[in-house]
Image (spheres, coloured by chain):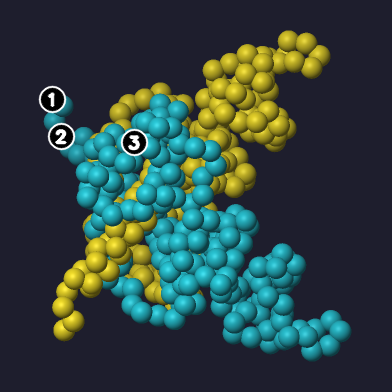
Chain colours: A cyan, B yellow
Amino acid sequence: MWISELATTVGLPVPTVKFYLREGLLPTGTPTGATRADYDEHHVRRLRLIRALTEVARLRLDGVRAVLDAMDDESLPWHEAIGSAHRRLGAVSGTPSPAASERVEGLVRDRGWTVHEGSVQRAALAHALDALDSLDHPASDELLHTYADAAEAIAAKEVAGVHGEDRVSATEHVVVSTLLLEPVLLNLRRMAQENASAKSVDRRHREPAS
Amino acid sequence: MWISELATTVGLPVPTVKFYLREGLLPTGTPTGATRADYDEHHVRRLRLIRALTEVARLRLDGVRAVLDAMDDESLPWHEAIGSAHRRLGAVSGTPSPAASERVEGLVRDRGWTVHEGSVQRAALAHALDALDSLDHPASDELLHTYADAAEAIAAKEVAGVHGEDRVSATEHVVVSTLLLEPVLLNLRRMAQENASAKSVDRRHREPAS
């Protein structure tokens, strides 16, 4: 198909598709003349992924590039490609404080979780706790355990859904489930917040003043 | 304090602080000469928020601007400022499919949730479901309900923690709890995934082949 059909299929303007080609995020098509190239299903799929990572997962361009690079690096066994994508996504600038790192350490111990010592998630979590502290909105232990309970329930269901797949499908599966299910969870959290907030106002209106 | 002390206090390089000043994200200090200005605690706080939104919540510059604009717009009553920040953050490009919108509609109904008809979260959720469908990784109803259960448990705890506060603190509270607690939840989810995955491999190794 020509670039115009590719763009229409995926629902993006042609200049946007050209931009991704120039940036090297989308492989060039097969040349069929001086100025034309032919695109196939592989391009459609890759472009849908780029669109989802940008619009739904809200990644910046460098984030999209990191994810695609990890997916494309065939020198890595697939379970390492997954780790690599996770690491590139989770990389935090700066070092978390010893106190925050120790808190994360304690949480992992309390939960009895098996989480790699050098896991970027540990550092990213500690970094987020530092940011909350610096803004005088520390996350309480109670809140962290509420989140951890929810995370455990979710992970149990998610991991049960992963089957043996080929390398490309497996890394794409992880990218999709990590990045594209996150907005699903976050939007449900905001909706549940709105609901809890509405119900709580409602209750206060109906209860007699004490 | 001078700009160098401001930068050191927040832990950012001076050129980065100058960049935020040029972009209008950080208000200029009080001029104390032709080329010097004085900065105070308000600037420290704002700069910490910008840093957290960029590094921890991973917002793009336009996202940071949208959040700060909503916080600063004093023409809005604070509960509307919260809605405005939510809307600006959640805005999705394009219209979700009728099927995905209907699915979100059904979920809200099944859960008995009170969620505003025009809520951006509804559209953002439908948009995410479309993206997952387009990549052949549809989210099952079972998974959505697992997420919704978790979201309900989390929201109940979170809403209980909001007290009457002045407008600036209240909007900042929402920004912080919406944007900065999200990375906490997401990192815990990834850690719980790693744990569930490790435990499941472990189990397979110990169980006799059937």
Q: Which residue is mark 2?
A: A207
Measured as percent of width and height from the top left, residue B147 is found at 30, 59
Q: Vertical placement of B66 versus B200: above or below? A: above
Tell me if label 2 and label 1 are in contact, CB under 8 Å: yes
Direction from residue B118 to residue A188 in the image, left or right: left
Q: Quadrant of residue A74?
A: bottom right
Q: Vertical placement of A152 versus B184: above or below? A: below
Question: Badge 2: few (under 14), some or many (20 or more) residues near its Cα, within 10 Å?
Answer: few
Give the Cα distance between marks 2 and 1: 8 Å
Give the Cα distance between marks 2 and 3: 44 Å
Residue A82 visible from this viewpoint: yes
Measured as percent of width and height from the top left, residue A152 is found at 25, 56
Residue at the far bottom in the pictured view: A32
Three-letter amino acid code of the residue under disc 3 = Glu
Direction from residue A6 to residue A48 in the image, left or right: left
User: Which circle marks residue A102 in the picture?
Assistant: 3
User: Which circle marks residue A210 in the picture?
Assistant: 1
